[in-house]
Amino acid sequence: MACFYILNELLKWCCPKENPQKSSQPKKLRPIKVLCIDDDQVNRTLMKKVVNNISSNIEVRLAMDGSQGLNMIDSFKPDIVFLDMLMDKMNGNEMVKKVQRRFPKYIDRIAVVTSLDSNSKEVTECIFMGCDYIKKPISPDKIRTSVFKILDRYKLRSNLNQEI
Protein backbone atom coordinates (compact mmCIF):
# COMPACT_ATOMS: atom_id res chain seq x y z
CA MET A 1 0.00 0.00 0.00
CA ALA A 2 2.84 2.40 0.84
CA CYS A 3 4.48 1.66 -2.52
CA PHE A 4 1.29 2.58 -4.34
CA TYR A 5 1.09 5.86 -2.43
CA ILE A 6 4.75 6.73 -3.17
CA LEU A 7 4.33 5.82 -6.85
CA ASN A 8 1.19 7.94 -7.09
CA GLU A 9 2.97 10.94 -5.51
CA LEU A 10 5.95 10.43 -7.82
CA LEU A 11 3.65 10.42 -10.86
CA LYS A 12 1.98 13.62 -9.66
CA TRP A 13 5.36 15.25 -9.31
CA CYS A 14 6.96 14.18 -12.58
CA CYS A 15 3.82 14.12 -14.77
CA PRO A 16 1.48 16.83 -13.55
CA LYS A 17 -1.96 16.87 -15.08
CA GLU A 18 -2.88 19.87 -17.16
CA ASN A 19 -5.29 22.18 -15.46
CA PRO A 20 -8.47 21.61 -17.49
CA GLN A 21 -9.76 25.09 -16.66
CA LYS A 22 -6.70 26.77 -18.15
CA SER A 23 -6.60 24.75 -21.36
CA SER A 24 -10.32 24.94 -22.07
CA GLN A 25 -10.68 28.69 -21.60
CA PRO A 26 -9.92 30.88 -24.60
CA LYS A 27 -7.22 33.46 -24.31
CA LYS A 28 -8.70 36.85 -23.50
CA LEU A 29 -7.86 39.42 -26.14
CA ARG A 30 -8.17 43.13 -25.84
CA PRO A 31 -11.18 44.57 -27.64
CA ILE A 32 -10.81 46.26 -31.00
CA LYS A 33 -11.33 49.99 -30.47
CA VAL A 34 -13.40 51.82 -33.09
CA LEU A 35 -14.09 55.55 -33.21
CA CYS A 36 -16.96 56.86 -35.36
CA ILE A 37 -16.89 60.59 -36.13
CA ASP A 38 -19.97 62.11 -37.73
CA ASP A 39 -21.93 65.30 -37.08
CA ASP A 40 -25.23 63.52 -37.76
CA GLN A 41 -26.58 61.60 -34.75
CA VAL A 42 -28.52 59.13 -36.90
CA ASN A 43 -25.37 58.25 -38.87
CA ARG A 44 -23.34 57.83 -35.66
CA THR A 45 -25.96 55.52 -34.17
CA LEU A 46 -26.25 53.49 -37.37
CA MET A 47 -22.48 53.15 -37.68
CA LYS A 48 -22.18 52.03 -34.05
CA LYS A 49 -24.86 49.39 -34.55
CA VAL A 50 -23.26 48.06 -37.74
CA VAL A 51 -19.78 47.93 -36.18
CA ASN A 52 -21.03 46.25 -32.99
CA ASN A 53 -22.69 43.53 -35.09
CA ILE A 54 -19.31 42.48 -36.49
CA SER A 55 -18.11 41.08 -33.16
CA SER A 56 -18.81 41.32 -29.45
CA ASN A 57 -15.11 42.06 -28.97
CA ILE A 58 -15.38 45.61 -30.30
CA GLU A 59 -15.57 48.77 -28.24
CA VAL A 60 -17.15 51.68 -30.13
CA ARG A 61 -16.93 55.33 -29.16
CA LEU A 62 -18.65 58.21 -30.93
CA ALA A 63 -17.56 61.77 -31.67
CA MET A 64 -19.84 64.45 -33.09
CA ASP A 65 -17.22 66.61 -34.81
CA GLY A 66 -13.60 66.75 -35.87
CA SER A 67 -12.35 68.55 -32.75
CA GLN A 68 -13.91 65.98 -30.46
CA GLY A 69 -12.59 63.26 -32.76
CA LEU A 70 -9.01 64.54 -32.51
CA ASN A 71 -9.24 64.58 -28.71
CA MET A 72 -10.64 61.05 -28.70
CA ILE A 73 -7.88 59.76 -30.99
CA ASP A 74 -5.43 61.08 -28.40
CA SER A 75 -7.22 59.60 -25.38
CA PHE A 76 -9.01 56.48 -26.71
CA LYS A 77 -6.25 55.37 -29.13
CA PRO A 78 -8.57 53.60 -31.60
CA ASP A 79 -7.57 50.79 -33.93
CA ILE A 80 -10.03 52.06 -36.55
CA VAL A 81 -11.56 55.49 -37.22
CA PHE A 82 -14.65 55.98 -39.38
CA LEU A 83 -14.76 59.63 -40.41
CA ASP A 84 -17.56 61.47 -42.15
CA MET A 85 -16.14 63.70 -44.87
CA LEU A 86 -18.78 66.44 -44.84
CA MET A 87 -19.06 68.02 -41.39
CA ASP A 88 -19.70 71.63 -40.39
CA LYS A 89 -17.06 72.55 -37.81
CA MET A 90 -14.13 70.69 -39.34
CA ASN A 91 -14.59 68.64 -42.48
CA GLY A 92 -13.05 65.22 -42.84
CA ASN A 93 -10.29 66.41 -45.12
CA GLU A 94 -9.16 69.04 -42.59
CA MET A 95 -9.26 66.45 -39.85
CA VAL A 96 -7.20 63.94 -41.84
CA LYS A 97 -4.54 66.63 -42.37
CA LYS A 98 -4.49 67.36 -38.62
CA VAL A 99 -4.26 63.65 -37.81
CA GLN A 100 -1.35 63.36 -40.23
CA ARG A 101 0.48 66.15 -38.37
CA ARG A 102 -0.41 65.19 -34.78
CA PHE A 103 -0.89 61.40 -34.92
CA PRO A 104 0.77 60.14 -38.11
CA LYS A 105 0.55 56.47 -37.11
CA TYR A 106 -3.26 56.71 -37.23
CA ILE A 107 -3.56 57.93 -40.80
CA ASP A 108 -3.97 54.47 -42.34
CA ARG A 109 -6.49 53.48 -39.66
CA ILE A 110 -8.98 56.02 -41.00
CA ALA A 111 -11.84 55.13 -43.31
CA VAL A 112 -13.48 58.23 -44.76
CA VAL A 113 -17.22 57.82 -45.24
CA THR A 114 -18.76 60.09 -47.85
CA SER A 115 -21.22 60.58 -50.64
CA LEU A 116 -18.46 62.25 -52.68
CA ASP A 117 -16.97 60.30 -55.58
CA SER A 118 -13.54 58.77 -55.16
CA ASN A 119 -12.18 61.13 -57.83
CA SER A 120 -13.18 64.29 -55.91
CA LYS A 121 -10.22 66.36 -54.74
CA GLU A 122 -10.99 65.86 -51.03
CA VAL A 123 -11.35 62.09 -51.24
CA THR A 124 -8.33 61.71 -53.53
CA GLU A 125 -6.17 63.60 -51.00
CA CYS A 126 -7.34 61.34 -48.16
CA ILE A 127 -6.75 58.18 -50.17
CA PHE A 128 -3.30 59.45 -51.20
CA MET A 129 -2.44 60.00 -47.50
CA GLY A 130 -3.36 56.37 -46.77
CA CYS A 131 -7.02 56.43 -45.70
CA ASP A 132 -9.60 53.87 -46.72
CA TYR A 133 -12.71 55.10 -48.57
CA ILE A 134 -16.35 54.07 -48.13
CA LYS A 135 -18.98 55.48 -50.49
CA LYS A 136 -22.39 56.26 -49.00
CA PRO A 137 -24.90 54.84 -48.58
CA ILE A 138 -23.11 52.64 -46.08
CA SER A 139 -23.93 48.97 -45.76
CA PRO A 140 -22.85 46.33 -43.27
CA ASP A 141 -20.76 44.66 -45.99
CA LYS A 142 -18.86 47.87 -46.81
CA ILE A 143 -18.16 48.53 -43.12
CA ARG A 144 -17.12 44.92 -42.46
CA THR A 145 -14.77 44.97 -45.47
CA SER A 146 -13.15 48.17 -44.26
CA VAL A 147 -12.81 46.85 -40.69
CA PHE A 148 -11.13 43.65 -41.92
CA LYS A 149 -8.82 45.54 -44.29
CA ILE A 150 -7.57 47.84 -41.53
CA LEU A 151 -7.28 45.05 -38.93
CA ASP A 152 -5.40 42.83 -41.38
CA ARG A 153 -2.92 45.65 -41.85
CA TYR A 154 -2.14 45.48 -38.12
CA LYS A 155 -2.63 41.73 -37.66
CA LEU A 156 -5.51 42.34 -35.25
CA ARG A 157 -8.25 40.49 -37.09
CA SER A 158 -7.90 37.46 -34.83
CA ASN A 159 -9.10 39.62 -31.93
CA LEU A 160 -12.56 39.60 -33.53
CA ASN A 161 -12.73 35.81 -33.43
CA GLN A 162 -12.50 35.52 -29.67
CA GLU A 163 -15.36 36.18 -27.32
CA ILE A 164 -14.54 37.74 -23.96
Image (cartoon, rainbow, N blue to C red):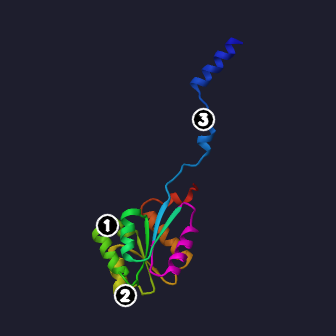
Q: Is residue 9 magenta?
A: no
Which residue is identified by label 1? 103
Q: Position of residue 51 (x, y in %)?
A: 53, 70
Instruction: Indicate whether 99 appears above or below 114.
Output: above
Q: Are marks 3 and 2 in contact (CB under 8 Å)?
A: no
Q: Amino acid at mark 1?
A: Phe
Q: Position of residue 21 (x, y in %)?
A: 62, 41
Crowd class of label 2 (few under 14; some 14 to 19; many from 20; radius 10 Å): few
Tag nearer the camera, 2 or 1: 1
Q: Which residues are drawn in magenta?
A: 36-57
Q: Position of residue 90 (x, y in %)?
A: 35, 81
Q: Residue at x 48, y 61 (%)?
A: 32
Q: Which image quadrant: the C terminus? A: bottom right
Which residue is identified by label 2? 120
Label 3 and label 1: CA atoms lie apart by 45 Å
Q: Secondary structure at mark 2?
A: loop
Q: Secondary structure at mark 1?
A: loop
Q: Residue furthest right?
A: 1
Q: Amino acid at mark 3?
A: Glu
- Earlier sequence position, callout 3 versus callout 1: 3
Q: Amino acid at mark 2?
A: Ser
Q: Residue at x 56, y 56 (%)?
A: 162
- Earlier sequence position, callout 2 versus callout 1: 1
- Earlier sequence position, callout 3 versus callout 2: 3
Which residue is identified by label 3? 18
Q: Nearer the viewer, residue 139 or 68?
A: 68
Q: Nearer the viewer, residue 163 or 145?
A: 163
Q: Is residue 54 magenta?
A: yes
Crowd class of label 1 (few under 14; some 14 to 19; many from 20; radius 10 Å): some
